[in-house]
Amino acid sequence: MVAPPDNDVLWARGLTHAHDGSPALHSVSLGVRDGEILAVSGPRGSGKTTLLRCLSGQLLPQEGEVWFNSTPVHTMGPLTRERLRRDRFGWIDPEPALVPELTAWENVALPLMLRGFGRRAAKTAALEWLQRLDVGGCARKRPYALLHSERQRVVVARALVGSPTVLFADEPTAPLHRAERGHVLRTLTAAARSHGITVVLATHDPETAALADRTVSLLDGRRVRTVHLPQPAETEGRAACSLSV
Protein backbone atom coordinates (compact mmCIF):
# COMPACT_ATOMS: atom_id res chain seq x y z
CA MET A 1 0.00 0.00 0.00
CA VAL A 2 1.10 3.56 -0.75
CA ALA A 3 0.13 6.28 1.74
CA PRO A 4 -1.86 9.22 0.29
CA PRO A 5 -0.54 12.79 -0.08
CA ASP A 6 -0.43 14.73 3.19
CA ASN A 7 -2.84 17.43 2.00
CA ASP A 8 -5.58 14.97 1.00
CA VAL A 9 -8.14 14.29 3.72
CA LEU A 10 -9.60 11.54 1.51
CA TRP A 11 -7.72 9.50 -1.04
CA ALA A 12 -8.87 6.54 -3.10
CA ARG A 13 -7.10 4.36 -5.62
CA GLY A 14 -8.47 1.78 -8.02
CA LEU A 15 -11.95 1.55 -6.51
CA THR A 16 -13.91 -1.21 -8.20
CA HIS A 17 -17.30 -2.50 -7.12
CA ALA A 18 -20.25 -4.35 -8.65
CA HIS A 19 -23.83 -4.78 -7.41
CA ASP A 20 -25.22 -8.24 -8.13
CA GLY A 21 -22.71 -8.63 -10.91
CA SER A 22 -23.51 -5.26 -12.48
CA PRO A 23 -20.43 -2.93 -12.49
CA ALA A 24 -20.91 0.25 -10.46
CA LEU A 25 -17.31 1.48 -10.21
CA HIS A 26 -14.34 0.55 -12.33
CA SER A 27 -10.83 1.50 -11.15
CA VAL A 28 -11.77 4.99 -9.88
CA SER A 29 -9.00 6.99 -8.21
CA LEU A 30 -9.22 10.47 -6.69
CA GLY A 31 -8.04 12.70 -3.88
CA VAL A 32 -10.01 15.26 -1.88
CA ARG A 33 -8.09 18.10 -0.28
CA ASP A 34 -8.73 19.30 3.25
CA GLY A 35 -11.51 21.91 3.26
CA GLU A 36 -12.36 21.37 -0.40
CA ILE A 37 -15.88 21.15 -1.82
CA LEU A 38 -15.70 18.46 -4.48
CA ALA A 39 -18.61 17.75 -6.81
CA VAL A 40 -18.99 14.25 -8.22
CA SER A 41 -21.12 14.71 -11.32
CA GLY A 42 -22.69 12.35 -13.79
CA PRO A 43 -26.07 11.03 -14.92
CA ARG A 44 -28.16 8.72 -12.78
CA GLY A 45 -26.60 5.27 -12.60
CA SER A 46 -23.07 6.54 -13.23
CA GLY A 47 -21.73 5.31 -9.87
CA LYS A 48 -21.89 8.50 -7.80
CA THR A 49 -23.69 6.99 -4.79
CA THR A 50 -21.48 3.89 -4.81
CA LEU A 51 -18.38 6.09 -4.83
CA LEU A 52 -19.63 8.16 -1.87
CA ARG A 53 -20.52 5.00 0.06
CA CYS A 54 -17.04 3.57 -0.52
CA LEU A 55 -15.32 6.82 0.47
CA SER A 56 -17.40 7.07 3.66
CA GLY A 57 -16.81 3.48 4.75
CA GLN A 58 -20.44 2.43 4.35
CA LEU A 59 -19.39 0.03 1.61
CA LEU A 60 -16.12 -1.85 1.25
CA PRO A 61 -14.92 -1.84 -2.36
CA GLN A 62 -14.26 -5.21 -3.91
CA GLU A 63 -10.93 -3.84 -5.13
CA GLY A 64 -8.97 -0.70 -4.28
CA GLU A 65 -8.04 1.46 -1.30
CA VAL A 66 -9.69 4.29 0.66
CA TRP A 67 -7.68 6.45 3.08
CA PHE A 68 -8.93 9.07 5.54
CA ASN A 69 -6.24 11.32 7.05
CA SER A 70 -3.59 8.72 6.13
CA THR A 71 -5.57 5.93 7.85
CA PRO A 72 -6.72 3.01 5.66
CA VAL A 73 -10.51 2.78 5.80
CA HIS A 74 -10.62 -0.32 3.60
CA THR A 75 -8.84 -2.41 6.25
CA MET A 76 -11.01 -1.28 9.19
CA GLY A 77 -13.48 -3.63 10.84
CA PRO A 78 -17.22 -2.85 10.86
CA LEU A 79 -17.27 -1.31 14.36
CA THR A 80 -14.29 0.95 13.63
CA ARG A 81 -15.86 2.16 10.41
CA GLU A 82 -19.16 2.78 12.21
CA ARG A 83 -17.37 4.87 14.83
CA LEU A 84 -15.57 6.81 12.10
CA ARG A 85 -18.85 7.63 10.40
CA ARG A 86 -20.45 8.65 13.69
CA ASP A 87 -17.61 10.88 14.90
CA ARG A 88 -15.98 12.29 11.76
CA PHE A 89 -18.41 12.07 8.86
CA GLY A 90 -21.80 13.55 8.01
CA TRP A 91 -24.21 12.14 5.42
CA ILE A 92 -27.18 13.55 3.50
CA ASP A 93 -29.42 11.24 1.46
CA PRO A 94 -31.62 12.33 -1.47
CA GLU A 95 -34.68 11.30 0.53
CA PRO A 96 -35.12 12.66 4.08
CA ALA A 97 -34.87 9.76 6.54
CA LEU A 98 -35.78 10.86 10.06
CA VAL A 99 -36.69 9.02 13.26
CA PRO A 100 -40.52 9.29 13.27
CA GLU A 101 -40.88 9.23 17.07
CA LEU A 102 -38.55 12.23 17.56
CA THR A 103 -39.26 15.91 17.01
CA ALA A 104 -37.27 17.89 14.44
CA TRP A 105 -34.83 19.28 16.99
CA GLU A 106 -34.37 15.86 18.58
CA ASN A 107 -33.56 14.39 15.18
CA VAL A 108 -30.95 17.08 14.60
CA ALA A 109 -29.50 16.71 18.11
CA LEU A 110 -29.32 12.92 17.93
CA PRO A 111 -25.76 12.69 16.46
CA LEU A 112 -24.44 14.93 19.24
CA MET A 113 -26.15 12.96 22.00
CA LEU A 114 -24.78 9.72 20.55
CA ARG A 115 -21.33 11.29 20.90
CA GLY A 116 -21.91 12.09 24.57
CA PHE A 117 -23.15 15.69 24.46
CA GLY A 118 -25.58 16.76 27.18
CA ARG A 119 -29.20 17.24 26.18
CA ARG A 120 -29.17 21.01 26.73
CA ALA A 121 -26.03 21.62 24.66
CA ALA A 122 -27.27 19.33 21.89
CA LYS A 123 -30.64 21.09 21.82
CA THR A 124 -29.05 24.54 21.61
CA ALA A 125 -26.89 23.49 18.65
CA ALA A 126 -29.84 21.79 16.94
CA LEU A 127 -32.09 24.85 17.27
CA GLU A 128 -29.35 27.08 15.89
CA TRP A 129 -29.01 24.99 12.75
CA LEU A 130 -32.77 24.73 12.26
CA GLN A 131 -32.95 28.54 12.40
CA ARG A 132 -30.15 28.85 9.83
CA LEU A 133 -32.11 26.63 7.48
CA ASP A 134 -35.37 28.56 8.03
CA VAL A 135 -37.19 25.72 9.78
CA GLY A 136 -36.80 26.91 13.37
CA GLY A 137 -40.58 27.04 13.67
CA CYS A 138 -40.73 23.30 13.02
CA ALA A 139 -38.45 22.38 15.92
CA ARG A 140 -41.18 20.70 18.00
CA LYS A 141 -42.96 18.98 15.13
CA ARG A 142 -42.52 15.31 14.33
CA PRO A 143 -41.60 14.26 10.78
CA TYR A 144 -45.17 13.30 9.77
CA ALA A 145 -46.23 16.92 10.38
CA LEU A 146 -43.51 18.40 8.15
CA LEU A 147 -43.57 19.13 4.45
CA HIS A 148 -41.17 17.10 2.36
CA SER A 149 -38.93 20.13 1.84
CA GLU A 150 -38.93 20.84 5.59
CA ARG A 151 -37.88 17.27 6.35
CA GLN A 152 -34.96 17.61 3.94
CA ARG A 153 -33.82 20.81 5.66
CA VAL A 154 -33.90 18.97 8.98
CA VAL A 155 -31.71 16.24 7.47
CA VAL A 156 -29.21 18.88 6.29
CA ALA A 157 -29.17 20.43 9.77
CA ARG A 158 -28.55 17.01 11.32
CA ALA A 159 -25.59 16.44 9.00
CA LEU A 160 -24.00 19.80 9.84
CA VAL A 161 -24.69 20.04 13.58
CA GLY A 162 -21.63 18.05 14.62
CA SER A 163 -19.19 19.97 12.37
CA PRO A 164 -17.99 16.77 10.67
CA THR A 165 -14.55 16.57 9.12
CA VAL A 166 -16.12 15.36 5.87
CA LEU A 167 -19.72 15.78 4.76
CA PHE A 168 -20.99 13.40 2.08
CA ALA A 169 -24.03 14.81 0.31
CA ASP A 170 -25.80 12.53 -2.17
CA GLU A 171 -28.09 14.74 -4.27
CA PRO A 172 -28.89 16.68 -1.07
CA THR A 173 -31.47 19.04 -2.56
CA ALA A 174 -33.17 16.68 -5.01
CA PRO A 175 -36.60 16.94 -3.27
CA LEU A 176 -36.56 20.75 -3.10
CA HIS A 177 -38.00 23.38 -5.40
CA ARG A 178 -35.53 25.57 -7.28
CA ALA A 179 -35.65 28.55 -4.89
CA GLU A 180 -35.39 26.35 -1.80
CA ARG A 181 -32.59 24.36 -3.42
CA GLY A 182 -30.48 27.47 -3.87
CA HIS A 183 -30.96 28.62 -0.29
CA VAL A 184 -30.10 25.24 1.21
CA LEU A 185 -27.05 24.81 -1.01
CA ARG A 186 -25.76 28.28 -0.14
CA THR A 187 -26.24 27.55 3.56
CA LEU A 188 -24.51 24.19 3.22
CA THR A 189 -21.50 25.52 1.30
CA ALA A 190 -21.15 28.62 3.51
CA ALA A 191 -21.24 26.47 6.65
CA ALA A 192 -18.68 24.10 5.18
CA ARG A 193 -16.29 26.92 4.34
CA SER A 194 -16.70 28.74 7.67
CA HIS A 195 -16.21 25.52 9.67
CA GLY A 196 -13.49 24.04 7.46
CA ILE A 197 -15.66 21.05 6.51
CA THR A 198 -14.65 19.02 3.47
CA VAL A 199 -17.65 18.24 1.26
CA VAL A 200 -18.06 15.49 -1.32
CA LEU A 201 -21.24 16.34 -3.22
CA ALA A 202 -22.88 13.97 -5.70
CA THR A 203 -25.08 15.69 -8.25
CA HIS A 204 -26.35 15.45 -11.81
CA ASP A 205 -27.24 19.17 -11.81
CA PRO A 206 -24.63 21.50 -13.42
CA GLU A 207 -25.79 24.48 -11.33
CA THR A 208 -25.18 22.54 -8.13
CA ALA A 209 -21.79 21.33 -9.34
CA ALA A 210 -20.82 24.93 -10.13
CA LEU A 211 -20.82 25.73 -6.38
CA ALA A 212 -17.93 23.32 -5.81
CA ASP A 213 -14.21 24.09 -5.96
CA ARG A 214 -13.64 21.21 -8.37
CA THR A 215 -15.66 18.60 -10.25
CA VAL A 216 -14.96 14.93 -10.91
CA SER A 217 -17.18 13.35 -13.57
CA LEU A 218 -18.34 9.73 -13.73
CA LEU A 219 -19.90 7.81 -16.58
CA ASP A 220 -20.72 4.10 -16.38
CA GLY A 221 -18.62 3.78 -13.23
CA ARG A 222 -15.48 5.36 -14.71
CA ARG A 223 -13.87 8.77 -14.31
CA VAL A 224 -14.22 10.75 -17.51
CA ARG A 225 -13.47 14.13 -18.90
CA THR A 226 -16.02 15.75 -21.19
CA VAL A 227 -14.78 17.37 -24.37
CA HIS A 228 -17.22 19.73 -26.09
CA LEU A 229 -16.60 19.58 -29.84
CA PRO A 230 -17.83 22.10 -32.41
CA GLN A 231 -20.98 20.66 -33.93
CA PRO A 232 -21.51 20.78 -37.70
CA ALA A 233 -25.00 21.68 -38.82
CA GLU A 234 -25.92 18.09 -39.58
CA THR A 235 -24.95 16.88 -36.09
CA GLU A 236 -26.48 19.64 -33.99
CA GLY A 237 -28.07 18.36 -30.82
CA ARG A 238 -25.65 15.51 -30.31
CA ALA A 239 -24.16 15.18 -26.84
CA ALA A 240 -20.56 16.10 -26.11
CA CYS A 241 -18.02 13.30 -26.29
CA SER A 242 -16.97 11.73 -22.98
CA LEU A 243 -13.49 10.28 -22.90
CA SER A 244 -12.06 8.00 -20.22
CA VAL A 245 -8.99 9.22 -18.37
Image (tube, grey):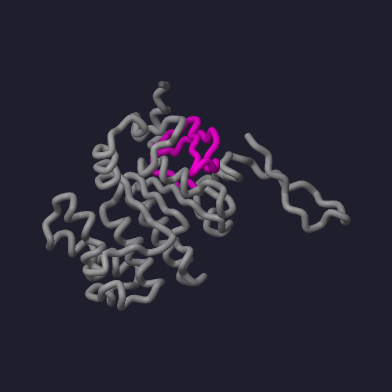
Quick one: 146 or 166, which is closer to the camera? Answer: 146
Q: Answer left or right for 57 relative to 24.
A: left
Where, quadrant-wise, is the C terminus in this rendering? top right
Q: What kind of secondary structure does the magenta stretch mostly adopt?
A: strand
Taking the spot 32% from the left edge, 56% from the top edge, the residue there is 159
Image coordinates of residue 48 in percent, x first then y, are 50, 48
Quick one: 19 or 110, which is closer to the camera? Answer: 19
Residue farthest along the right direction in this orientation: 234
Residue 18: in magenta span: yes
What residue range appears in magenta?
A: 10-38
Q: Answer left or right for 193 relative to 240.
A: left
Image coordinates of residue 28 in percent, x first then y, are 52, 35
Taking the spot 34% from the left edge, 34% from the top edge, the residue there is 73
Q: Answer left or right for 37 relative to 209.
A: left
Taking the spot 52% from the left edge, 58% from the top edge, the residue there is 208
Number of numbered labels in the structure image? 0
